[in-house]
């Protein structure tokens, strides 16, 4: 209890002892900032993808545990396919202002700890986007220098010019993956506009659920037939099938839902203790409903979620023998899909289990456990969760075309599909 109370107390201290390194990913750099969401306005579970020259808008929201409100600002940074800043100047991809203030904020009611909720629609009438591609939303105080950045979020602006045909065959090209891995078969159809050097200038990014640690980027076509690009690699384009996500429902602290062992309330707030988890690697596949690793921020029906939703320190416990030369992480939208120190699990030799505490707002959460061997950056879901072809994963395909003048990566196609709709050859 003392350990958890101390973690709550640390939220009010934001002094940066070491300079922070800003990266172009979904990441929070200030401990006072919590529950950063960016989604297509009206659908919290949607991907942050909008169409160029449309009325599409993204809804940004986040909570700040500071005791006073601030005039936070934001700007947009255009990136290439690999999320590196492009060579474009802001005047080339933005029309109007290059930065805006976030003026809509609301103080929380009866919440411990208290917070201020901020929200903003992007793009605004004062800042319009002129080019498609990958974008970083950067929110900061005063100026966008690294020391002042609060968080960064990825989003996409697409020109829907190319289309994709996808399939996940039951028998992959490499038969050792049968019953386990999911092979993604792709055919991309492009208009005549993109017939110039298609194998050199058109590339794909494939993302499984919301993960970036195992995303496949820079994929080039192996053959071209008229306006059709084909992708036939010797072993195929393969992802771990994994397993359905674990979940817990803490939309209310008045009752314990399935998978919640105990809810504790004291003067410092709530503590939610989840039931102990165990490995599923050697168990049969079970069909479970999930939201593919996402989170739904939602309080009780008699609460206004954005200002009355409360926070809890959620305790995760995994009963498992110590995995040598590797780290274990909790992964999902609940921690922005980051394999970082906040989601890394500690190991208790006496209890023979891993444990981790994460501060979360009322809502419904998916998560899984991944193992990251020392010296690597990709999480292995199969060690603890298992590996099944039947798993219902969501995949996103992003199609890029490299323009030469000006030089930037256009996003000319986006397609989202589920492995539930598969072809059995």
Image (spheres, grey):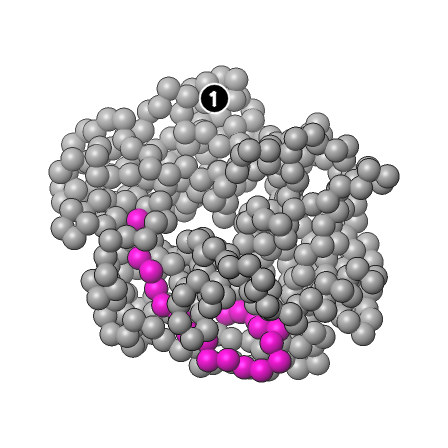
157 vs 164, nearest the viewer: 157
Within the magenta stretch, is there residue 73? Answer: yes
Residue 419, above or below 335: above
Pointer 1: what residue? Answer: 171
Tell me the magenta residue range.
60-80
Which percent across, then down, holds residue 294?
56, 53
Residue farthest to the top?
Answer: 175
Q: What is the chief secondary structure element of the magenta stretch?
A: strand
Q: Quadrant of the C terminus?
A: top left
Residue name at image x 46 percent, y 18 percent: 174
279 vs 374, nearest the viewer: 374
Which percent across, then down, holds residue 177?
52, 22
Residue farthest to the right?
Answer: 350
Residue 269, above or below 391: below
311 vs 388, nearest the viewer: 311
Within the magenta stretch, is there residue 182? Answer: no
Residue 359 shows in the view? yes
Residue 299 shows in the view? no
Residue name at image x 29 percent, y 39 percent: 203
Which percent across, then down, holds residue 96?
24, 74
Residue name at image x 82 percent, y 58 percent: 262
115 vs 232, nearest the viewer: 115
């Amino acid at each position: 209890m003392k350990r958890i109370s101390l973690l709550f107390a640390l939220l009010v201290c934001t002094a940066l002892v070491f300079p922070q390194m800003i990266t172009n990913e979904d990441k929070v750099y200030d401990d006072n900032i919590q529950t950063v969401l960016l989604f297509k306005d009206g659908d919290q579970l949607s991907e942050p993808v909008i169409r160029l020259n449309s009325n599409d808008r993204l809804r940004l929201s986040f909570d700040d545990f500071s005791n006073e409100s601030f005039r936070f600002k934001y700007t947009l940074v255009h990136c290439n396919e690999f999320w590196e800043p492009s060579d474009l100047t802001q005047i080339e991809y933005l029309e109007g202002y290059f930065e805006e203030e976030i003026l809509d904020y609301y103080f929380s009611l009866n919440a411990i700890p208290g917070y201020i909720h901020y929200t903003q629609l992007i793009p605004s009438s004062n800042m319009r986007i002129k080019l498609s591609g990958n974008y970083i939303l950067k929110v900061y105080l005063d100026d966008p220098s690294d020391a002042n950045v609060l968080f960064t979020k990825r989003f996409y602006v697409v020109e829907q010019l190319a289309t994709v045909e996808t399939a996940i065959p039951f028998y992959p090209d490499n038969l050792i993956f049968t019953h386990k891995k999911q092979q993604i078969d792709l055919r991309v159809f492009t208009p005549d506009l993109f017939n110039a050097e298609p194998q050199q200038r058109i590339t794909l990014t494939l993302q499984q659920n919301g993960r970036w640690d195992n995303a496949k980027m820079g994929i080039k076509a192996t053959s071209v037939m008229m306006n059709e690009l084909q992708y036939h690699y010797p072993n195929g384009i393969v992802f771990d099938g994994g397993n359905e996500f674990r979940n817990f429902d803490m939309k209310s602290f008045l009752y314990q839902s399935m998978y919640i062992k105990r809810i504790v309330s004291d003067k410092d707030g709530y503590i939610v203790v989840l039931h102990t988890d165990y490995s599923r690697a050697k168990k049969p596949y079970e069909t479970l409903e999930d939201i593919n690793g996402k989170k739904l921020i939602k309080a009780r029906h008699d609460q206004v979620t954005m200002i009355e939703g409360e926070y809890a320190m959620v305790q995760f416990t995994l009963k498992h023998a110590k995995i040598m030369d590797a780290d274990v992480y909790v992964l999902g939208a609940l921690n922005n899909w980051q394999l970082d120190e906040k989601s890394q699990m500690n190991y208790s030799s006496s209890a023979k289990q891993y444990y981790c505490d994460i501060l979360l707002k009322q809502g419904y959460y998916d998560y899984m456990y991944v193992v990251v061997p020392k010296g690597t950056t990709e999480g292995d879901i199969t060690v603890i969760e298992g590996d099944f072809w039947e798993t219902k994963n969501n995949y996103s395909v992003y199609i890029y075309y490299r323009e030469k003048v000006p030089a930037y990566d256009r996003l000319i196609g986006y397609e989202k599909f589920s492995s539930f709709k598969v072809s059995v050859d």
